[in-house]
Image (cartoon, rainbow, N blue to C red):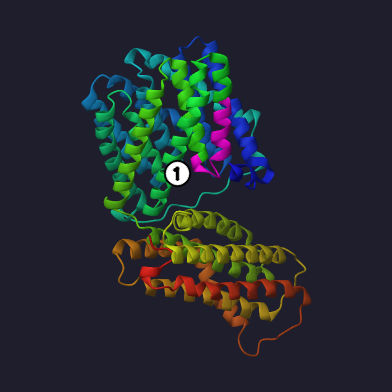
Amino acid sequence: MKRIFVAPDPGHLRLRNASRAVLGIALAVALAELAGLSLTASITGGLAALLALFTVADATVRAQRITTALLPAAGLPALALATTLHSVPLGRDAAFLAVVFCGVYARRWGPRGHALGIFAFMQFFVVQFLHAAPADLPELYLAVGIALAAAGAVRFVVWPIERRTPPAAVPAPLPGRGLARPTTRQAFQTTAACAFALAVGQLLSEERWYWAVGTAWWIFVNTASRGETLVRGFRRVLGTVLGILAGLVLALPLHGAPGPTAVLVAVCVFGIFYAAPVSYSWMMLAVTVMAGLLYGLLGVLTPGLLVLRAAETGVGALFAALAVTFVLPVTTHATNDAWIQRALLAVRRCTAEAAERLAGSPTADPAPHAAELEVLLGRVRMALAPLVHPLSPFRDRKARARQVLALLDDCARELRGLTAVAADPDAGHDARLAAACWRVEAAVEALLRGREQVLEGMAPEASGALGSARGAEATGAGVRGAEAVGPCAREAAPGAPQAAAPKAVPALAHLRGLERLLAELDGPLRTAPRSLPVRS
């Protein structure tokens, strides 16, 4: 709990986002009630608004609007399919698994595909949750339309947070073709996990089996490797168990009373959005309590139902763990190496741009590359999270992973300083900057060559992920950084004038700091394969 409230919240963005979510979802439900829709339709609308505000995460406001407008195209067919097949178990199950596969496969198209896939899955899921029938479909369509309009109005008109604080950019997925693409592998993993969870979940309960499928599905959201998925599964089970205990205290005594239930649901919605960026377990606690409150409104909440929810969650988590381990596994070390390499390439590009800027180039700008590095470091932290988890048994690997994270964070700090110096038009030019720039870029190249040597003889899946990531980064935007070595080397050639430029001293200090940090990274990143800090 302490982590939620002491975690940094620059500009109170989490607070504002959570408050806006409560407003948007409350408006959606209120409009559904004013329209005379049933409780089932109102809950469906509230969930649609929640998903629209939670999952749409494109890099620009314009792209967010387009994705929000496309949500009905993904969700309404899923609603129709689920309600039509609700009384046809075999057809329903097959359709559900098809939606699972397509929803995960869509992640290859970035944030938009990710949001549309989640929305389609959850529309199929909510029909199982509410036991909606074909006769309910017109009401459900109307509720979803009202909810998306309300959520869009609150997000883009009433409370446009993103206009003042642009959302953090999302790094492009790791590249690959066919089964070498991580999102394709994950589509097969998730479908296999959901298939087994569905079968065993129905053995536990013919009415509440969908919780096992939902657990398996959500464990694979925002994960890219075996280690990440296993850690997320553990956190989901932990959060669900804590939520069930809280539900016994909070939801059961209410007996579905509308007023108090609505207040607590609003608190849960706030908790979901406020906790999500910093704690998956606490977010799941809020989700579980909210589900219990909704069951209370529907008049079916009992202690036995909450215990069944825990059992179904365990089933889903178990098969997610088995699927990610045995079905086309994406190992943790392969994913980590690819993201670390992309971060190092961002260091090189930022350094080259800063050197050109300090040399007088009016078009060079290191700021976008420094921002890119910050985004990539967030992804590196996610990838290394399994190794630094408190329950990780690999102490040496945990120490090395923490060392890598600390050194990369220090690199980012030095680059922020270098970028600030380069932005000063009076910073001047010192020929020593060129030599320092070249040394930094050479150090990055040495680290990249070292990683390739370490990975020789490892599984094709590992070296393939690393090679394809480097190939993608070395072309396009990466070419500028590679070409920058030439000018640096030429300017640092013997005999070049060593003019005194006192204002260049801060830039030199940052470049020398980068050189030192990259040298310190050499040790942990060259560790033997069986002791890698990025080894799962």
Q: Residue furthest left?
A: 90
Q: Residue furthest top?
A: 36
Residue 394 is situated, as x and y percent measured from the top left of the image, at 42, 62
Residue 452 visible within the image = yes
- The amino acid sitting under disc 1 is Arg
Please name the residue shown 53% across and 43% down the image.
279
Q: Quadrant of the N terminus?
A: top right
- Please check the rendered image and state whether residue 302 is part of the magenta-colored stretch, yes or no: no
Label 1, secondary structure: give it: helix
Residue 156 visible within the image = no
Q: Main secondary structure of the magenta part?
A: helix
Where 234 falls versus 394 (above or below)? Answer: above
Is residue 419 shown left or right of residue 102? right
Please name the residue shown 57% across and 81% down the image.
489
In this view, the residue in front, 261 or 68, is 261
Residue 74 is situated, as x and y percent measured from the top left of the image, at 39, 31
Q: Which residues are magenta?
A: 266-281
Where 114 falls versus 454 (above or below)? Answer: above
- Please check the rendered image and state whether residue 274 is part of the magenta-colored stretch, yes or no: yes
Is residue 312 shown left or right of residue 350? left
Task: List the residue tagged with mark 1.
Answer: 235
Residue 163 is situated, as x and y percent measured from the top left of the image, at 65, 39
